Image (cartoon, rainbow, N blue to C red):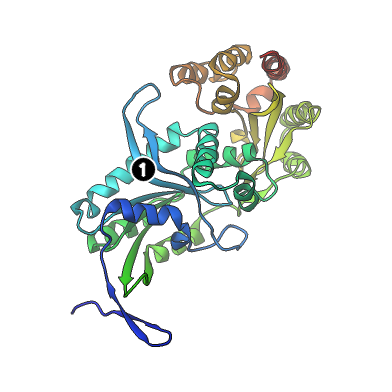
Amino acid sequence: MAEQPVFLLGEGLSALEPAAFDTEVEFQALLARHPRILDFGSLADGRPLRLFLVAREMRVPTGSESGAAYWLDHLFVDADGVPTLVEVKRAADTRVRREVVGQMLDYAANGARYWPAALLQRTFEETCAMDGRPLEDAYRELLGGQSPEEFWVTVEERLGAGRMRLLFVADRIPLELRAIVEFLNRQLRQTDVYAVELTQYRGSGDHRVLVPRVHGEVATANKTQSRPGQAARRWTRADMEAALENRSPEQRQAALALLDHAEAAGRTVGNRAAYPSVSVSFPASGREVPVWTLSLREDPDKDDLAFSFGSITHHLGRDATSAFADALPVVEGLRQKIATQMDKGFTGWPTVPLAALSTQPAALRQVCAAVEQLMGEGSAR
């Protein structure tokens, strides 16, 4: 049966007939201009979801030093810091059936590895400038009281944890793709996968109607109900102290020492996360440079301190990050992680267990000294 038109009722009755998008470029540009088409669902606090464009044709490296790259059609983000990866195909493109799934998984895996917070922030701000959108307006809607650096660190953490949305958008979603989307949603715990069928209807003049149909919501809803842990929230110093009550005296003392050192510069910021977490930016070269994040997990043995090498490199350069890395203590695997980061250009988040720092007071003091050295070197630039 042929697809029926939709009818626009005004002074008269106008029939709008189904119409294909002329080109994939037109299709992509439409979504970039009007992301509301893809707004469905809600944020963690129940507010309606709104997507903000980070970039169209977002570069996805395949290695830290490789010139090879993929190109994602669109990268969006919401106010919870959850990234949304979008790949667009017309029904006439046979890759919409299976090949597009492999492409998307490549983008997600490599984006999680090679999109540091600093790169995401710079890309978003460049996109706003190109679109003529005042940055203050964009951030007013997006940040909810956070600084831009805090927000993009959260986005990077979401990527690293696999907490993201993958959207396949086409003017016709074949049954094969719908089946794959449902399967992936049942298997992936942190990542939500959707197929969005966007049907276009055209009438006389400039009349157009766009009708999105979302596939995958049922599987996502069922998965969300079964996810362990609590909903994301913003954490404060008081929350961190409360969570530390059930830690060993040594771990509690180490964590409080880190927080006290950070607050001496007045830069401690609570993260929005499902577990107690704060990030700290320190002043260097006239800017706020994200340096570390302290996270308290459900299992105290997994509490960790993560160093924001990507942000330090972006703000102060690779040499400053290398000097900072050299000044950090030799504790439980940190040297090996730093060596790996050196090979990757200092773009990641090497971590050290809080328990390891708590048993070595000298190592804790060395971390604080490394931060102070970084602040001094940055200020001298």
Q: Secondary structure at mark 1?
A: strand
The image quadrant of residue 147 is top right
Q: Is residue 218 left or right of residue 263?
A: left
Determine the residue positioned at 21% across, 50% down.
95
Q: Is residue 72 left or right of residue 369?
A: left
Vertical comparison of 28 with 372: above or below: below
Vertical comparison of 93 with 380: above or below: below
Which residue matches tag 1? Answer: 72
The C terminus appears in which quarter of the rendering? top right
Vertical comparison of 307 with 58: above or below: above
The N terminus appears in which quarter of the rendering? bottom left
Determine the residue positioned at 37% across, 69% down.
206
Between 95 and 220, the one lying in front of the other is 95
- From the top left corner, tell me how far across and down residue 196 is, in percent: 36, 61
Determine the residue positioned at 77% across, 29% down.
253
- From the top left corner, tell me how far across and down residue 217 is, in percent: 42, 64
Between 105 and 136, the one lying in front of the other is 136
Q: Is residue 185 left or right of residue 331?
A: left
Query: Among all residues in the image, which is located at the extreme right?
Result: 264
Vertical comparison of 238 with 46: above or below: above
